[in-house]
Image (cartoon, rainbow, N blue to C red):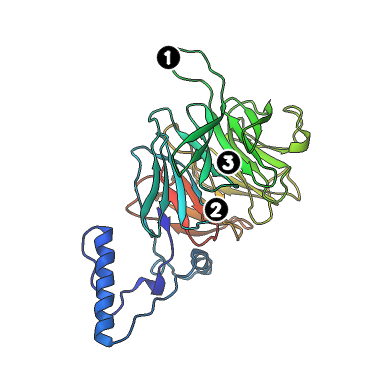
Amino acid sequence: MVRKTSPSGGRKRPGEAPPPADTLSKKLRRRKEGRGAQEAATGRSVKKNRATSIVHYIYRNSLGHHIYSQMRQVRESASPFDRRITCLEWHPNHHGTLAVGSKGGDVVLWDYNSRKMTCFIQGKGAGDCIGALRFCPNDPSKFYTVSGDGTLSLRSFADGQATVLSSTADCGHDRHDNCFWYCSVDVSQSRQMVVTGDNVGRVLLLDINGQELWNQKLHKAKVSHVEFNPCCDWLLATASVDHTVKLWDLRNIKDKGSFLHEMPHDKAVNSAYFSPIDGSKLLTTDQYDQIRVYSSSNWSRPQKVISHPHRQFQHLTAIKATWHPMYDLIVAGRYPDERVCPGKLRTVDVFDANTGALVCQLHDPNAMGIVSLNKFNPMGDVLASGMG
């Protein structure tokens, strides 16, 4: 799903044809025909009101204004996979284009403006889950993926070809393909490096072409998330299901004890995202009911702890809270739990990172699943959501 604001409060224009109960394409065609008829009758063109950014509506909602008549809850939607969505990533240059990975190893490149799947790469099916995806900073027609088959690969949207950069160790068991696989990946353009973590606590650093630089066991269990700081490129964050998040200096990693800071959590941790504005904050999501915000002024304790229901189970894509690219806003999908807080709707929640206040909730009654993944595009005016 892609959410965006709608123009003019969502009201129909005079003379606009009523939307028929038909497909989306037919609805759009009839709307255009209605506008054309109005232009012919009045002898003038109908001006389009510019859509307001979703952030403006969130701000107005925080002031107590009623925004739901003015915000289009779902701009476009698509269901390209036969299995659940496991990751999504906006294109760095084309802000209307989104890459999405699935449990079956499929990857699709979707341009929501043209409503087209511009590329579809079919996976291997069961066991080929796309754990994470990042665009190549040197060539955005390519992207890095980690897969359930135990590989870190550089793939191409142009021809669908994959170059395997690293493979986990072969377990040698006959009853399944592998016991080890990579779970997370990130890329640093300034350092020309790729980092990945596996399901047993190892972190692997490579150059942009796949040459291994080091391979260390830095956690006791699965490394669920790895991320380079966007402003301080030697600072690396790793999150793990061993209940910890750790910060590392890439210039001085010798062993698992050489971390700069360790942030213990009560539960396993799904993610740890640096704030994209200046990299001075870290946003973590555990596997039960805590979203935490840490600040560089004191990494040792959270600046804010937000109580939020998002418990984890095996067949659900892990819920990960993410940042707005320009404002201190946090977005996260909700898995309702009365033990944590009231409310039965499976909403997408937006929080103020400084106060922890809930400033907006988005809900589509046609989306019955849990919206595990939510990311704003680089401009911050469109939110992509994926049900896991």
Q: Residues within 10 Å of mark 3 (few under 14, many from 20)?
A: many
Mark 2 residue type = Pro
Q: Nearer the viewer, residue 160 or 227?
A: 160
Q: Which is more N-terminal, label 1 or label 3? A: 1
Mark 3 residue type = Ser
Contact between labelled residues 3 and 2, with CB atoms less than 8 Å apart: no
Q: Is residue 11 left or right of residue 172?
A: left
Contact between labelled residues 2 and 1, with CB atoms less than 8 Å apart: no
Q: Is residue 304 left or right of residue 30?
A: right
Which residue corresponds to the image point at 68% horizontal and 46% vertical from the top-left?
229
Residue wearing tag 1: 175
Q: Secondary structure at mark 3?
A: strand
Q: Quadrant of residue 216?
A: top right
> Residue 271 — which label?
3
Note whether 23 is above or below 160 in the view shown: below
Q: Secondary structure at mark 2?
A: loop
Q: Nearer the viewer, residue 209 or 273?
A: 209
Outermost residue, bottom direction? 43
Where residue 66 sits in the image (x, y, percent)? 44, 69
Q: Which is more N-terminal, label 3 or label 2? A: 2
- Rendered-image quadrant of the C terminus: top left
Q: Nearest to the eye among marks 1 and 2: give it.
A: 2
Separation of residues labelled 3 and 1 (CA atoms): 31 Å
Where residue 177 sits in the image (x, y, percent)? 45, 19
Mark 1 residue type = Arg
On the question of residue 27 being in view, the answer is yes
Q: Nearest to the eye among marks 2 and 3: give it.
A: 2
> Residue 92 — which label?
2
Q: Is residue 105 left or right of residue 267?
A: left
Separation of residues labelled 2 and 3 (CA atoms): 21 Å
